[in-house]
Amino acid sequence: MGLTLAYKLLSEHLEKGELRQGESISIRIDHTLTQDATGTMAYLEFEAIGADRVRNELALSYIDHNTIQIGFENFDDHEYLRTVADRKGIIYSRPGNGICHQVNLERFALPGKTLLGSDSHTPTAGGIGSFAIGAGGLDVALAMAGVPFQMVAPRVVNIRLSGSLRPFVSAKDVILAVLAHFGTKGNVNTVFEYTGSGVGTLSVPERATIANMGAECGVTTSLFPSDDMTRQFLEMEGRGEGFRYLKADDDAAYDDVWELDLSSVEPLAACPHSPGNVKSVRELEGIAVNQVLIGSCTNSSYADLRKAADILSGSHVHPDVELGVAPGSRDVLMMITEDGTLSKLIKAGARILESACGFCIGSHQSPGTESVSLRTSNRNFYARSGTASAYVYLVSPETAAASAITGVFSDPRKCGKAISSAAMPEHIIHDDSMFIYPTFSAEIRRGPNIGQPPRNTALPESLHGHALIKVEDRITTDHIMPAGARMKYRSNIPEYSKYVFESIDPEFSSRAAEARDKGEHGFIIARQSYGQGSSREHAAICPMYLGIKAVVAVSIERIHQANLANFGILPLLFDNEDDYDRIGMGDELEILHVRDAMESGAFILHDITTGDDIPLHIFATEDQKKTILLGGKLNEVAL
């Protein structure tokens, strides 16, 4: 029986373990990627484990998140990142060069390479045939040091595409259709592999959009074959020497197959407050719109902006709407400047925003009170935009542009405009002058906001404390650790920890710190899909700093589970889902004989308040169990 493309690439990079679904394996990582919001801690961890220089094939540090520099903190972080990159052998992408995933796709990503990035949308590179995985910063730091990456051999789902997209329907609508089918939970340790005749009709940037938002389904990565379309893209980027044909064997067996006819897809939108809450634009037509934002790592390519500009051309933004456009990279900005696309956007009334993550992470362009914002980004979690009362919808650039003109949710197929069918420009501009290559000579600069990664203590024989918070389904890492205005504290854990669960329980941090200072072990109680969303390891580090020793949940998402293990927090699951209801907020809890339970994997949580004994099991590999016992990887690894 033949191999899926996913298992072909895993086989090429296998360093430890047996390549059987569900087994713990370790793979060699070729490329690594960080961005400034997660990268500062990743490089502090790289130093903490004693690494002198990078050992993997290619390491890249992008500055794209904290570019609105109010106060000294962001600039100090950038200075640290620039100088540590020079010292340790990392290519540094300067602020303004663009969003990491867009720039990486254009300038570095290659078919067949493994890529580990400290950002959950690292799978964007799956659009070019890379096996690209999002992870916490500590895992990326270890990969840079040459340590193989631990993962679970995944189940592989074949999404078989046929047909071709109709005018005014885009790759964003395709991935929203995927989300509508598969949902945002239940896809842990899964790879989406795209095959079929429809794949050949999609450009690399379109494939990248689809791979990017596979992260919202919770999959490990999404993967497209490398074919003639891939070769054309790389040759246009001047990187044709990195091309190789890659596809699954004709007789490859998949764990599941889903058929999608591209010609059947229509304009879709993800409604508040989840990327999986998908409706057709037809159902939403007429809803008043206050803000439209086009960009993000999902939809900021040249083709995306050109199609939006074609719709906007000759019209003007509705007086009730603010429109902002953020090109994904400096190269895209130069291309739309050269061909007149930028002029169309400006004449239509668009504000041109920096080539950065910006509005997607809530660091600027927050919508108004109870207003409606249409965005081409990938997440619309509650309060992520910076305005808790706002209603954020995720849409395609075509739907965004059409709605910006009318002032209401509008189906772009009715706009009466002609749009370009060109997926790529006739001439690609690539200017690499904003990359700084390492000299290994810089003195590392550390401002007062640059701290040290905290270390946990070894897991004790018993845990005793309280349920310090009890949360519902789909708690995201944005709920746990806010971005936006708080993101500048990512390198200062004592300060950042003051804002854990800020949007749902502002008193949590002080309550947890008080319990920690009394010598108690804190518990977090959660329902399904706890920790979905971004890769930010701070959602584990800061609770650990506040004394949290265990998360007890119905289910935990992949990256967050790994981050919990990396920092010595027990990831525990209810044997019986209904037992969630038996634990009350503030209940006194204990787990005895913890180390013995680690061997069997079976735990008993005794609720002292109610007298109930609740069976649990650990959600961790054997390697992760060893890490947790030691109190995290920083206590385990020394180079």
Image (tube, rainbow, N blue to C red):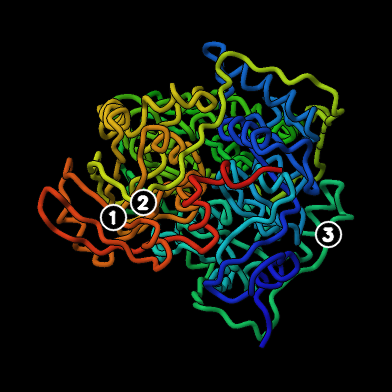
Mark closer to the chain start, 2 or 3 = 3
Q: CA distance from mark 1 to mark 2?
A: 7 Å
The reply to whether discs 2 and 3 touch (Cβ–Cβ < 8 Å) is: no
Specify the farthest residue to the right.
241
Give the position of the N terminus as an image quadrant.
bottom right
- Mark toward the start of the polypeptide (1 vs 2): 2
Tag 1 residue: 592
From the viewer's perspective, is the residue at label 3 or at label 1 nearer? 1
In depth, the one of 246 and 355 nearer the eye is 246
Indicate the amino acid at tag 2: Glu
Which residue was labeled with disc 2? 461
Q: Of the numbered discs in the image, which one, if any, rests on residue 243?
A: 3
> Is 31 located above or below residue 292 in the figure?
below
Q: Residue at x 36, y 48 (%)?
A: 274
**Left or right: residue 567 compared with residue 110:** left
Horizontally, residue 325 falls left or right of residue 470, namely: right
Residue type, numbered disc 1? Leu
Secondary structure under tag 2 reads loop
Asked whether the viewer can see residue 23, the reply is yes
- In-image side of 32 versus 483 (left or right): right
Which of 71/124 is in front? 71
Residue at the left extreme of this rendering: 610
Q: CA distance from mark 2 to mark 3?
A: 53 Å
Q: Is residue 29 above or below residue 58?
A: below
